[in-house]
Amino acid sequence: MAASLNRREFLAGSGRLVAGAAAAALVEDAPAEEKLPELCLACRDEHLKETHRKDSWAALDAIGAAGVEAAVADDLALPGLFHPDRRYSVATPAGLSAVRADMKAAGKRITALCMGNRFEDRPEFELEWCAKAAAAAQALGAKAIRIDVVPHKLAVPEFLDFAVRTLKKLVEATEPTGVAFAVENHGGTTNRPDFLAPLFERVGSPRLGLTLDTANFYWFGHPLSKVYELYETFAPRVRHTHCKSIRFPEAEREKQRPVGWEYGKYNCPLYEGDIDFRRVLKALRAVHYTGDLCVEDESLGKVPPDERGSVLAKEIRHLKECM
């Protein structure tokens, strides 16, 4: 017969049982680990000919990418996508059908359209063009359109007012499509947080967001630590990306440098640059970003032509390793 427990031993054993039961209950009640959304690894269409493949879809296969950002011309042609037998356009239902069919057959995606806008110079044309592009993007399953918001005539304070009025009209006119317009941070205006923040706030629509160019804030002169802060600040607005990098001398990384300082000398592939894409991904994951990671490499001209496709493939692998 087992020896009887004294009171102290009984209480200690009971405490262990209660603690164990409580811990088990916590485990049962704890939510399952959240599964992070799949991000599409993509490339800008203008780089794909560097692979020397027969068409854009084979080029994406060659570098390991699943998606492409396609530039759209004034006439709704897609001049950066290439094929030996056809020219791509989204100007007509037949053109859209051809793009969709080839895209589906290849198992690839167009993650975004890319527009080079001049809203000041031709406001009526721009609104009509953007509306047609949004309808095409919706038909193609592209969730975002990269746009330019750049002043050519107006000073920045006046241009901000103009941009807010114009983009409100644009968002309202394209509401049925659900497609986001993503202002790229580039040049001397949209790399400024004091321009971007009030632009987004005053337009007041989740369908106006950011094409986050990871290198352009750095190009603008922001110190590297400030660049990471900007990623976090604007992450909730990111709808599309341009992933590129720069490798500055160590002594220059935390300085406020002149705009564009030595960019042609120090721009480089993603895997050689100062920008830590794990930190970029961390900022985007924190706000449940579900868009693409799109390679844009402005340093390819430094590489021999027969090596450029390999560089792009290595950049896609680098992004995959950071995910």
Image (spheres, rainbow, N blue to C red):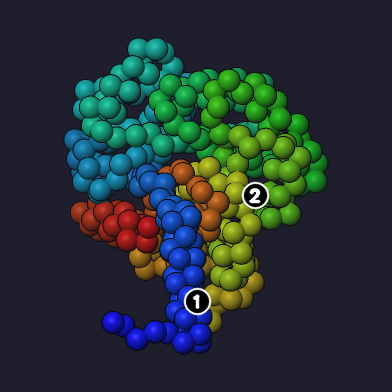
- The residue that mark 2 highlights is 190
Residue at 58% across / 71% down in the picture? 225
Residue at 37% across / 57% down in the picture? 323
Where on the picture, by quarter, is residue 72? top left
Q: Residue 19: horizontal and vertical position, in percent?
A: 49, 72
Question: Residue 294: in sight, yes or no?
Answer: no
Number of residues whose C-alpha sits closer than 10 Å to that of mark 1, classed few (under 14), some (14–19) or many (20 or more): few
User: Of marks 2 and 1, which one's residue comes earlier in the chain?
Assistant: 1
Question: Residue 282: in sight, yes or no?
Answer: yes
Q: How many marks?
A: 2
- The residue that mark 1 highlights is 15
Q: Residue 241: horizontal and vertical position, in percent?
A: 48, 48
Looking at this view, is 107 or 49 the one in front? 107
- SS for dot 1: helix
Left or right, 131 with reference to 292:
right
- SS for dot 2: loop
Q: Amino acid at mark 1?
A: Gly
Alpha-carbon distance for marks 2 and 1?
A: 61 Å
Left or right, 132 with reference to 312:
right
Q: Residue 315: horizontal and vertical position, in percent?
A: 32, 57
Number of residues whose C-alpha sits closer than 10 Å to that of mark 2, classed few (under 14), some (14–19) or many (20 or more): many
Q: Amino acid at mark 2?
A: Thr
Q: Residue 148: horizontal and vertical position, in percent?
A: 59, 39
CB contact under 8 Å: marks 2 and 1 = no
In this picture, is 136 found above or below 310? above
Where on the picture, by quarter, is residue 304? bottom left
Left or right, 56 with reference to 196:
left
Residue at 52% across / 38% down in the picture? 146
